[in-house]
Image: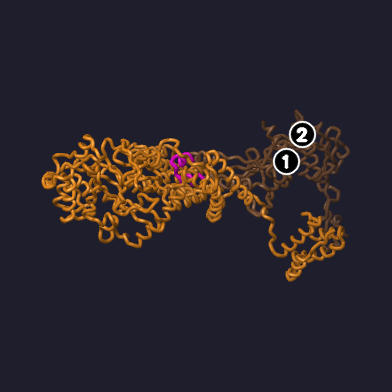
Chain colours: A brown, B orange
């Protein structure tokens, strides 16, 4: 039933942003309160007709007029709205994704009482004349991978809640859900793969140039960067650091864990740990190698690859 | 528990309820009304100080008590009044649990129902104000509730003006639909089910019996009883006797209708040269009788003419009712009196009024002829010190004796009653007729306004040669009452506000009320058909009228929807922008459309590439526009406006 309905809606016109809401996308039905008032109106109509009571009839017809307008105004409140884009930043499985929907109105009037719904999550907002707004819906995630969202609803009961006008639309693209990082991962596999990094001097400061910094009391003189100090008119010292491992290799095949999900989860935790410690790593997924690198982009690429695994 | 609704929504809902219930509150026992208002006040305070609803058992007990009070107050009698009071009480009880959007909406929407039920009791013109203001406040309440429901309610203390304005606009927009439906919704020729019985309002009006004081009570009541439009000239004031209940039975104090009072007439009343035909617009009085001039020839279909020529409606008159009547005043009623009727018309309690009985016997001896006897009594009334006055003492066991020999002052029912007793004692069959006498002729609008204060009682005696003949003893005592109306019998004002100019204003107001009755309230099945015929439409069946209604509704809704849904063209903020938009529109007509993504200069450069002959001008104007807009060159706006307006791209 639902898929048939979705198909029917999709056949009527565009349903993915960017889209502009027209009569093909907007549906309208009375609310429960609308039915109640309708019933009341019917009772008033019958009573007034029977007693030939013209003022009673007039009251009834005023209610009828209110109903008719309320239908038009509910439709008008959605008509011409533009849903510009949708999307959410990737999150780890289990965390709620913040799904952003950008909605703009070109009309020269306010659009009060709009509500955006997806499942149980909803957000209400007003859109001023020629306004643009970004609504956020929390979406719960459970599994890693691409999360295809079900249809979203943009609805309004404006002005008095007798009718509800709504539009269904689907997001442009799915939400990327990263694997859930293991809560208590084993320590990083130091030098697990390539043995040549093992004969390092135990120098906490290392001997690789890292950056220049202001000279501090206690810095040995051979660390002073004389040329640079001359250029900057202040005493600068070379800061040396030693990455503990040149090549951290994180291999899915060799990660501990009972099953694939657990291994992926531990690997995710390692990735994050490595990134926090600002180390460079290579991710090995079967035959595929990503890296070595230590940038955020690299981290995201790795997480995406794990999510899609 | 969900969040409590904000004060403003609750306050508007309560305001809507109180306004809609106001006439109902005024008509119910005061302590009940006070209880309902108290519940409203409690709810307001609860909204103000964020109180929680009372526990369920307390709500149930209080509601049960309130219902019990209603039952006691109305004695278990079921009628419109009981029903509406019950509705008000239930809504008052609802105040205790009105804490969700759903409850608020329920109360606000039932307000419309409450307003409509009030019109079962009265449809006077002033209730139009009630209808409009009540609907407005209820709509405001609904608007506020919706904004609470949508969660977009402004913070507390925000201005209420937008909600008021929005509701007013909603109502204004509802008007075209409402009026179309009002005019074209097919009216029923017959009611679907029975009409309600009498309400227990104690509405003032003529009652179906007569005892001392029953008519003089009405003397202070200037509200209209009915209005009459005559097809010809109106009858002279002395002939304006509006026949109501005819009373035959007398128990010593009270005159009542006989057991055969509802029997249909077996006499055919023909039309004659003096026939009067007229239309009466009767205000609802909760009784069945329709007032007519003597002797009704025919009335509306649903009416019955009784054996004593009273006209009875099938149902109590609960709404403004219009009926056509033809009367023949020259008819002779019952040239032969049956022995049964004669017996009823002569019956008197024997142990009452000995002095009156003695006087009757004495008069009978002096005047063997009935007519002589009647004239003698009327002459006695005229010559002796009889007074026509409102301030009469209540009478005791021998009422007629006290009146005729001691008090000698009273209102019409005293005279009618004493005269009838005297006649019966003298052996002349007599009956008492109550109704209205006189009326105010609204010369400008050509209708006769009969007020409650025109209520009157007179007698009919049966004569061998004339059948039942009207004799009005009041006329002998106070001819002015008959000729000039009831107000003329009292010197000076009846009460503090009984001033002439007030009376004039009331008369003026009644003319508006008359139009209102005629065109709004009296717009029934027949009027609707007349109206459509007046528009040049052929005779339409109910189905056709319904179709016509849908058609016109479509015609009304079309422009309304267009006006509402039309996208107003984006109006430029100032003249500079308008000139620029004008220029863009002219270029668009030549096939050069500025994309939304293009800056003015980019667009101008594109124009330059495709149409070099105008491109330079466009670039120049675009530069000026940018300088005005983004620079501080406000002085350059005038030349830009002039030049941009003058710009005409050439045809290709």
Q: Secondary structure at mark 2?
A: helix
Residue B551 seen from this side: yes
* The image quarter in which residue B297 lies: top left
Q: Secondary structure at mark 1?
A: loop
Check contact, mark 2 vs mark 1: CB within 8 A: no
Q: Is residue A148 left or right of B609 when viewed as pictured?
A: left
Q: Nearer the viewer, residue A123 or B103?
A: B103
How far is disc 2 from disc 1 in space, using C-alphas? 41 Å
Report the predominant secondary structure element of the magenta stretch. helix
The residue that mark 1 highlights is A13
Q: Which residues are magenta?
A: A45-61
Can residue B1 be spotted in the picture?
no
Q: Residue furthest top?
A: A258
Q: Position of residue A200 (x, y in %)?
A: 86, 42
- Quadrant in which residue B114 is drawn: top left
Task: Tell me whether marks 2 and 1 sit on the same chain.
Answer: yes
Residues packed near mark 1 inside 10 Å, few (<14), some (14 to 19) or many (20 plus): some
**Whether residue B298 is situated above or below residue B126 in the rendered picture:** above
């Amino acid at each position: 039933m639902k898929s048939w309905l979705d198909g029917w809606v999709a056949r009527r016109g565009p349903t993915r942003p960017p889209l502009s809401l027209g009569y093909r996308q907007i549906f309208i039905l009375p609310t429960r309160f609308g039915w109640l008032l309708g019933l009341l109106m019917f009772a008033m109509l019958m009573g007034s007709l029977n007693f030939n009571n013209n003022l009673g009839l007039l009251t009834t017809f005023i209610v009828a007029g209110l109903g008719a307008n309320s239908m038009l105004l509910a439709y008008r409140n959605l008509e011409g709205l533009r849903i510009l884009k949708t999307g959410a930043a990737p999150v780890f499985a289990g965390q709620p994704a913040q799904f952003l929907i950008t909605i703009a109105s070109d009309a020269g009037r306010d659009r009060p009482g709009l509500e955006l719904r997806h499942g149980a999550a909803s957000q209400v907002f007003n859109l001023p004349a020629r306004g643009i707004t970004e609504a956020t819906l929390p979406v719960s995630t459970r599994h890693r991978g691409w999360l295809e969202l079900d249809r979203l609803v943009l609805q309004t009961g404006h002005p008095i809640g007798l009718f509800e006008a709504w539009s269904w639309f689907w997001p442009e693209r799915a939400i990327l859900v990263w694997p859930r990082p293991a809560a208590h991962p084993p320590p990083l596999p130091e030098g697990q793969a390539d043995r040549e990094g093992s004969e390092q001097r135990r120098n906490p400061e290392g001997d690789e140039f890292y950056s220049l910094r202001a000279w501090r009391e206690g810095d040995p003189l051979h660390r002073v960067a004389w040329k640079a100090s001359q250029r900057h008119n202040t005493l600068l010292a070379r800061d040396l650091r030693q990455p503990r491992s040149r090549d951290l290799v994180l291999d899915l095949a060799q990660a501990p864990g009972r099953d694939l999900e657990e291994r992926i989860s531990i690997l995710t935790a390692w990735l994050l740990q490595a990134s926090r410690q600002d180390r460079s790593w290579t991710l090995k997924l079967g035959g595929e190698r990503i890296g070595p690198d230590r940038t955020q982009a690299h981290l995201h690429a790795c997480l995406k690859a794990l999510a899609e695994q | 528990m969900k969040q409590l609704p904000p004060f403003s929504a609750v306050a508007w809902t309560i305001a809507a309820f109180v306004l809609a219930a106001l006439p109902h509150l005024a008509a119910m026992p005061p302590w009940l009304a006070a209880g309902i208002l108290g519940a409203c006040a409690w709810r307001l305070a609860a909204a103000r100080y964020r109180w929680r609803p009372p526990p369920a058992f307390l709500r149930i007990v209080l509601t049960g008590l309130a219902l019990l009070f209603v039952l006691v107050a109305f004695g278990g009698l079921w009628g419109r009044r009981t029903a509406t009071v019950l509705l008000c009480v239930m809504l008052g009880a609802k105040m205790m649990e009105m804490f969700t959007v759903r409850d608020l909406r329920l109360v606000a929407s039932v307000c419309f129902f409450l307003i409509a039920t009030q019109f079962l009791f009265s449809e006077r013109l002033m209730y139009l104000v009630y209808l409009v203001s009540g609907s407005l406040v209820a709509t405001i309440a609904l608007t506020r509730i919706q904004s609470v429901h949508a969660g977009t309610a402004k913070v507390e203390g925000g201005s209420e003006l937008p909600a008021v304005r929005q509701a007013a606009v909603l109502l204004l927009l509802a008007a075209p639909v409402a009026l179309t439906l009002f005019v074209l919704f097919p009216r029923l020729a017959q009611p679907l089910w029975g009409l309600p019985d009498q309400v227990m309002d104690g509405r003032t009006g003529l009652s179906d019996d007569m005892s001392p004081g029953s008519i003089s009570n009405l003397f202070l009541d200037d509200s209209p009883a009915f209005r009459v439009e005559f097809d010809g000239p109106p009858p002279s004031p002395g002939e304006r006797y509006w026949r109501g209940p005819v009373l035959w039975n007398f128990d010593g104090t009270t005159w009542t209708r006989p057991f055969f009072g509802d029997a249909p007439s077996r006499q055919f009343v023909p039309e004659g040269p003096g026939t009067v035909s007229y239309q009466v617009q009767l205000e609802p009085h909760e009784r069945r009788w329709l007032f007519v001039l003597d002797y009704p020839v025919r009335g509306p279909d649903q009416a019955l003419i009784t054996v004593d020529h009273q006209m009875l409606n099938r149902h109590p008159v609960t709404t403004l009712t219009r009926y056509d009547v033809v009367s023949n005043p020259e008819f002779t009623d019952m040239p032969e009196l049956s022995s049964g009727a004669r017996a009823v018309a002569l019956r008197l309690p024997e142990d009452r009024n000995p002095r009156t009985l003695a006087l009757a016997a004495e008069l009978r001896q002096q005047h063997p002829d009935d007519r002589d006897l009647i004239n003698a009594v009327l002459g006695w009334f005229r010559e002796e010190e009889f007074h026509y006055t409102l301030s009469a003492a209540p009478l005791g066991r021998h009422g007629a004796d006290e009146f005729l020999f001691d008090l000698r002052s009273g209102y019409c029912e005293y005279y009618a009653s004493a005269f009838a007793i005297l006649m019966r004692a003298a052996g002349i069959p007599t009956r008492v007729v109550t109704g209205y006498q006189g009326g105010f002729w609204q010369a400008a609008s050509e209708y006769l306004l009969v007020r409650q204060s025109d209520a009157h009682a007179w007698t009919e005696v049966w004569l061998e040669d004339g059948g039942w003949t009207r004799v009005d003893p009041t006329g002998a005592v106070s001819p002015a009452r008959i000729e000039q109306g009831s107000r003329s019998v009292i010197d000076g004002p009846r009460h503090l506000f009984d001033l002439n100019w007030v009376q004039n204003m009331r008369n003026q107001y009644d003319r508006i009320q008359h139009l209102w009755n005629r065109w709004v309230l009296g717009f029934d099945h027949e009027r609707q058909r007349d109206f459509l015929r007046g528009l040049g439409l052929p005779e339409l069946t109910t189905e056709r009228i319904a179709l016509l209604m849908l058609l016109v509704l479509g015609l009304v809704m079309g422009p309304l929807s267009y006006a509402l849904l039309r996208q107003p063209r984006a109006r430029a903020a100032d003249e500079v922008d308008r000139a620029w938009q004008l220029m863009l529109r002219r270029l668009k007509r030549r096939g050069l459309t500025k994309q939304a993504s293009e800056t003015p200069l980019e667009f101008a450069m594109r124009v330059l590439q495709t149409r070099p002959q105008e491109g330079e001008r466009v670039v120049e104007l675009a530069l000026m526009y940018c300088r005005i807009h983004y620079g501080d060159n406000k002085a350059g706006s005038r030349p830009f406006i002039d030049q941009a307006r003058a710009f005409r791209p050439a045809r290709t």
